[in-house]
Image (spheres, rainbow, N blue to C red):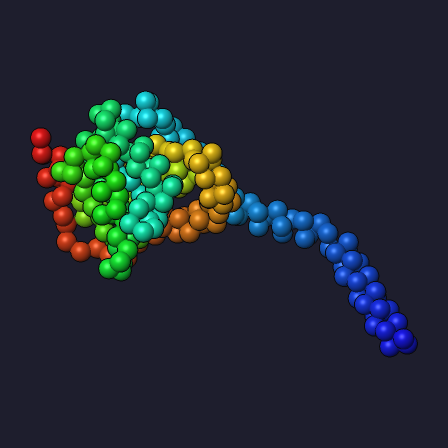
Amino acid sequence: MTGEVGLVSRGGRWARRVVGLVLRWRWPLAVAVALGLYGVVAPLGWAYAETGGRRVSVGAVPATPVGLVLGAGIRDGRPSVLLARRLDLAAELWRRGKVRVLLVSGDNRTKGYDEPSVMRAYLVAHGVPERKIVRDFAGLDTWDSCARAKRIFGVRRLTVVTQDFHLPRAVALCRAAGLDAWGVGDESLEARPDATITGYVREPLAMLKAMASIVAKPDPHLLGVQEAGVRTALASP
C-alpha cells in the first residue's frame, strides 16, 4: 500500500507541475496554437477567395471547349459514388453544350486499375459519344491532371468537375497550371455524408500540399509526348 500511495503522490505532483507550466505559459501557447491553425487554414481561405467567381453552377458556367473530370476511385470496374456523381455532372454539361469534349483524368498505374477507361464507359452508357471522350491515364493527383491537360493535351480553357469540397483547390491548381479554368461542383452531402465530411476536414491539409505546387509548378509525375486526342475530339462531328 505504501508503494501505491507513493506512486499516486508522485503522479499528483507531476500533474500539478504540468498544470502550473501550462498556466504560466498559457498566452505564448495560445498564440502558437493560433498561428499554427492560421497557417493550416489560411491557404484554403485564399483558395476560396481566389476562385470564388469561377466556381459556378451548371447553368451559370460559360461554355468552354473541354470539361476536365477528375478521378475519385473505382471498384469492381465501376466508379465510386462520388466519381459517378462527377460523371453525371460532366454528362449534363455536355448535353447542355457547356463543353464539347470531356477529358477524364485518373489513375492507371497498375494493369488492374484503370480509372479513365471506367469513366469513359460510364459516360458512354449515359449518352456521351465515345469520340467526345479523351482519356488521361496519368492523372495521379489534381496538380498532375491540370498540368497534363495543358502540357500534354494542349488545353487552354476548361471547366473542371469535382465535388464542392474539392473545387476551390482544383480550380486554383488548374489556374496555376496556366489554364483559364472554371469549376462546377457536386454537393454530394446527401449521397455520401461520410466521404463528404471527411473531404471537407482534410482539405486544409491538402491545400498546404497544393500551395507547394502552385508556387513551384513542378513537372507532373509522368509527362511523355504531347497527345492530339483533345484536338481530334474537338474536330469530330
| Left or right: 95, with 58 as reference point | left
**Image quadrant where one finds the N terminus:** bottom right
Residue 190 to residue 146: above or below: above
| Left or right: 190, with 137 as reference point | right
Quarter residue 128 falls in:
top left
What residue lies at 57% left-to-right and 47% top-to-bottom?
Answer: 37
Q: Position of residue 9 (x, y in %)?
A: 86, 69
**Residue furthest to the right:** 2
| Left or right: 18, with 219 as reference point | right
**Image quadrant where one finds the C terminus:** top left
What residue lies at 78% left-to-right and 58% top-to-bottom?
Answer: 19
What residue lies at 16% left-to-right and 38% top-to-bottom?
Answer: 130
Q: Position of residue 56 (x, y in %)?
A: 36, 27
Residue 99 to residue 80: above or below: above
**Residue furthest to the bottom:** 3
Quarter residue 89 falls in:
top left
Quarter residue 38 falls in:
top right
Q: Position of residue 109 (x, y in %)?
A: 27, 58
Q: Position of residue 120 (x, y in %)?
A: 22, 42
Is residue 119 visible in the rendered image? The answer is: yes
| Left or right: 16, with 67 as reference point | right
